[in-house]
Image (tube, grey):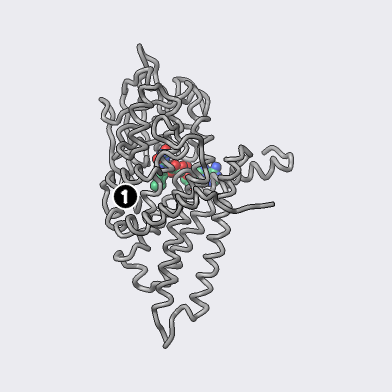
Amino acid sequence: MVSFAFTEEQREFQQTLQDFSRKRLLPGYRDRAASAEFPFDVLRQLGELGVLGIGLPEEYGGTGAEDPITLGLATETLAYGDVNLASAPIQIGLIGSQLVHATEEIRQNYLPAMIEGRKTVAIALTEPGSGSDAAAMTAVARPVDGGWQLTGEKTAISWACNASAALIYARDPGSTRAAGVSCYLVPLDAERVKVHHMPGMGCLPLGWGSIHLDDVFVPESHLVGEQGKGFQAVMSHFDFSRAAIGLMCLGAAQASMDEAIGYATDRHAFGKPIADYQGVSFQLAEHATYLEAARWMCYRALWLREENEPHTALASMSKWWPPVVAKNAIESAMRIHGNLGYSTEFPLQQRYRDVMAYLVADGTAEIQKKIIAKDVFERRGIVS
Ligand SMILES: Cc1cc2nc3c(=O)[nH]c(=O)nc-3n(C[C@H](O)[C@H](O)[C@H](O)COP(=O)(O)OP(=O)(O)OC[C@H]3O[C@@H](n4cnc5c(N)ncnc54)[C@H](O)[C@@H]3O)c2cc1C
C-alpha cells in the first residue's frame, strides 16, 4: 500500500514553520532580499526553531540521524515566506555533513554555532575555469611542514561574504580529476585570503562572492574527511540537497500562486473577476498540476534517500525540473497581476529572480540530465 502521509511530528513541525513563514518571514522578504546584508537575526530565529540542525549530530545541537523528508518539508515551508533564508537548512545540512568528519576542535568551533544560526560557512567548489566539470578544478594544496599551502580561486560562492570560513576543495599537486581532491576548512579572515562580493540578479542576502587563496597556510587539523576523498564525499550529499532545492523553489512558487489566486478573485475586468476567464483560471490550474507532480517527485527522492535506496537519478530530476516548474508558475502569477506583477512593490519579481538562481546553482539542468541519461541507459544494461 502506498502512503503519502507525513508523520504527526512532521505535520506539527510544518504547522509551526508555516506560521513563522507567513507571519514573520513573508512581510520582510522584499526588504531583506534588496539588501546584501545577511540577516543573522532571522537566521538565529531559524536556529531557535530547530531548523538548522536537521540531520546533524545531537551532541552539537542537531536532531540526530539524517532526516531528508523533514529537511525538505522545512525548506519548502520556509520558502513560502523567504526563499533566500529557506536555503539555510540545506546549506548548513550540506556543510555540516562534511564537518562531522573534521577534528573535534573544528566540530566544536563550527557546528553548534551554525546550528544556532550564529555563524555561516561556505562551500567552495566552483572555479572560474570549472563549474559543471567540477573535477577539473585547479586549486592546489601543496604539502608543507604541519599542513598545506592552498592556492587558487573559487567563484560564484554563496555565503562567501558573510561566512566565517569556507570548505575549500583543492587537489594534491599532480593529481587529476576527482582523485586527489581534498576538503579543507579555511577561515575567511586567514592571511592571504581575499573575498570579493559578486553582484547577482537575485539572492543578494546570500552574499555571493569569490574567494582568492594565495599560498594560504592550512594546518593539518583543518583537513575535513579523508585526504583525496573530498570530491566523492560532497557529491554523495548533493543527492540529498538537490531534491530539497527543488522543494524550496516550489515553496516560493506556491506563495506566488496563492497571491495570483487571491488577485484573480479580486480584480475585475469587463465586468467580472478575471478568475472567471479560463485564460486566467486554466493557467492557475495547469501550474497547480505541475507543482503537485513536481512536489511529490522531490519527496519521493527524499523518501528513497531515507530508505537507503538508489536515488541519484530521481534527485537530479528533482533538481532540474521543479525549479523550472517554479519559475514558470511565478512568471504566470506575475502576468496574472498585470502591471503589478512587474512592480518591485510586490514580491513576485523578487521570487522570480531568486528562484532563477537554482536553474544553475548546485548543477545546471544539462548536468542533471547527463546523470539521468546515464541511469536510463544503465537500467537497460547499456553503459554510456
Ligand atoms: C546563485 C548561485 C549560487 C552558487 N553557489 C555556489 C556555491 O555555494 N558553491 C559553489 O561551489 N558553486 C556555486 N555556484 C556555482 C554553480 O554550481 C555553477 O555555476 C554551476 O555548477 C555551473 O557552472 P558554470 O557556471 O561554470 O557553467 P559551465 O560549467 O561553464 O556551463 C555553461 C553552460 O554549459 C552547459 N554545459 C556544461 N557542460 C555540459 C555538458 N557536458 N553537456 C551539456 N551542457 C553542458 C551548462 O549546463 C551551462 O548551460 C553557484 C551558482 C549560482 C548561480
User: In which quarter of the view is residue 21 placed?
Assistant: bottom left
**In which quadrant is the C terminus drawn?**
top right
Residue 5 left/right relative to 197: right
| Quarter, ligand 1 | top left
In-front residue for pair 311/5: 5
Residue type at mark 1? Leu
Residue 369 left/right relative to 36: right
Q: Residues within 10 Å of mark 1 (few under 14, many from 20)?
A: many
- How many marks on residues? 1
Residue at 39% x, 16% y: name it.
Answer: 143
Residue 84 left/right relative to 13: left
Q: Position of residue 148 (x, y in %)?
A: 37, 18
Q: Which residue, as the protein is rendered here, is positioned at the far bottom?
A: 271
Residue at 42% x, 33% y: name it.
Answer: 96
Residue at 32% x, 56% y: name it.
Answer: 24
In-front residue for pair 33/359: 33
Where is mark 1, residue-wise? 204
Q: Is residue 248 above or below residue 331?
A: above
Q: Is residue 43 above or below residue 326?
A: above
Residue 380 in view here: yes
